[in-house]
Amino acid sequence: MDTLAISGLRIEASGMPLVRGVDAVAGPGRPLTLLGETGSGKSLVLGAATGTLPPRLRVTGRVLLDGTDILAAPPRARRGLWGRRLAMLPQEPWLSLDPTMRALGQVAEVYRLIRGLPATKSEEEARGRLAELGLEGAAGLYPFQMSGGMAQRLALAILRASEAPVLFADEPTKGLDADRRDEAGARLRLEADRGRTVVCVTHDVAIARALRGTVAVMLDGEVVEQGPAEAVLDYPAHEYTRRLLDAEPERWPSLPGRAAPRGEVVVSGDGLHRAFGGRPVLRGVDLSVRRGEVVAITGPSGCGKTTLGDLLLGLLAPDAGTVRRLPGVESWRFGKLYQDPPSAFVPHQTMRQALEDLSKRHGVAWNVVAPLLQRLRLSTTLLDRVPAALSGGELQRFALVRVLMLDPVFLLADEPTSRLDPLTQQEVLLLLSELAGERGMGVLIVTHDLELASKLADRTIHLEAGRFASSDVSVSRGRHPTLAEPFGTLTRGQ
């Protein structure tokens, strides 16, 4: 029972094939992982399997759940499966969570409405699910008060509460630190071991290894290699699979060293304190970033990494301490690449409109766009799509185009590759490293990935419990911080 079989699946948009002839099977205890780069068609296959593709797309083939074709079923019948036989962990949890409901209530309502438990028992079970995922202190928080990793774990708790026999997971580890990523993989594997059918879409090879089962590698809408996870991931037959595996950060070759950054300090913070709702998040943190320098901030989800970056940009005011930014530089040249790009774009506006508005607002020549699109492997045909018509990775790369158009002197890159497959991740991070040197741009990268930080950053600093883990910053790639020069000052309330 609860076997999902995809046969001859083809998806087209205006006669253009997006997915071509996909065949795959998942069953109880036999997970299916669709692995591949952003834009390869993985999430489209998932959308077909769940019956949630936009009506403008033409779908042929079959998706059978215990012999019943989901594609041929009427919409009402498909909706009746949700929460009872099918459950989804979405790619962008902030877009699927209820912004008006606290975390505990969002999990509890699954027990109450789907499982039929009374309110008191529903709340008790919900607290248990939150505690399992390290969210026991977040029961009273709204989604907008959570980090990306916390929101992802909340979505995992909701999925776990449904007890639906078929679980779909769309990029289940985006925004999670390494420990939480491993936990997520182990939990999905545990669900498979308990007899549930798990279908996972991911660019994270570690998750594919953790789930085992069957791996189908996708490229340009086609499955180019498929088989048992151990065979595909340890002995890949297709060139693309080998390239995908070699692009994992731990397999990167040592990057050529840049000269030690000696330019001006573009931004610094001294003695920064910040609390939310009476809970201290940062406690007396000092940090400076120079022109041409790449600094990485690592640490567990919710430890204050993004808050520190937002204080340096002036998006938040410190409760105590001082922020200084290079004087004489326009404020919009201090930029941020957001962790969740859908929240940074207008939903009904095309990419062309978004970039043209920016060009007109700040007097940026339009001809700077094409080279950036080319360097980030973005087709010009994507310019006329709205955010919902782009993959998470494509949207993240457009967000990078938008911020780079303004020639920033300082860029806060908040988990800049959490939505990217290993190949695109490698390209984007090498581009950021190159641009830091070419343009004299200071870069502060917020990341969970210690391996990535060690390969890319001039300095890596670990943040834990609101403080740097030691009084001395750890130095990567053989370079050392230097003293800051005096420059413009921003203090609390500015």
Image: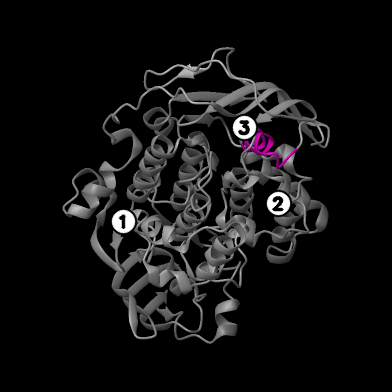
Dot 2 corresponds to which residue?
143
Q: Residue at x 53, y 17 (%)?
A: 473
- C-alpha gap between disc 3 and disc 1: 53 Å
N-term mark: 3 or 2: 2
Q: What amino acid type should be assigned to the residue bearing mark 1?
A: Thr
Q: Give the range drawn in magenta.
A: 306-316
Of the two numbered discs 3 and 2 in the rendering, the one whose residue sits closer to the viewer: 3
Q: Which image quarter: residue 357? A: bottom right
N-term mark: 3 or 1: 1
Measured as percent of width and height from the top left, residue 85 is found at 55, 68
Residue 140 appearing in the image: yes
The 10 Å Cα crowd at callout 3, few under 14, some 14 to 19, many 20 or more, is many
Dot 1 corresponds to which residue?
214
Q: Do the residues labelled 2 and 1 touch (CB within 8 Å)?
A: no
Q: In this view, does 67 lie above or below 85?
A: below
Dot 3 corresponds to which residue?
326
**Camera-side residue: 260 or 186?**
260
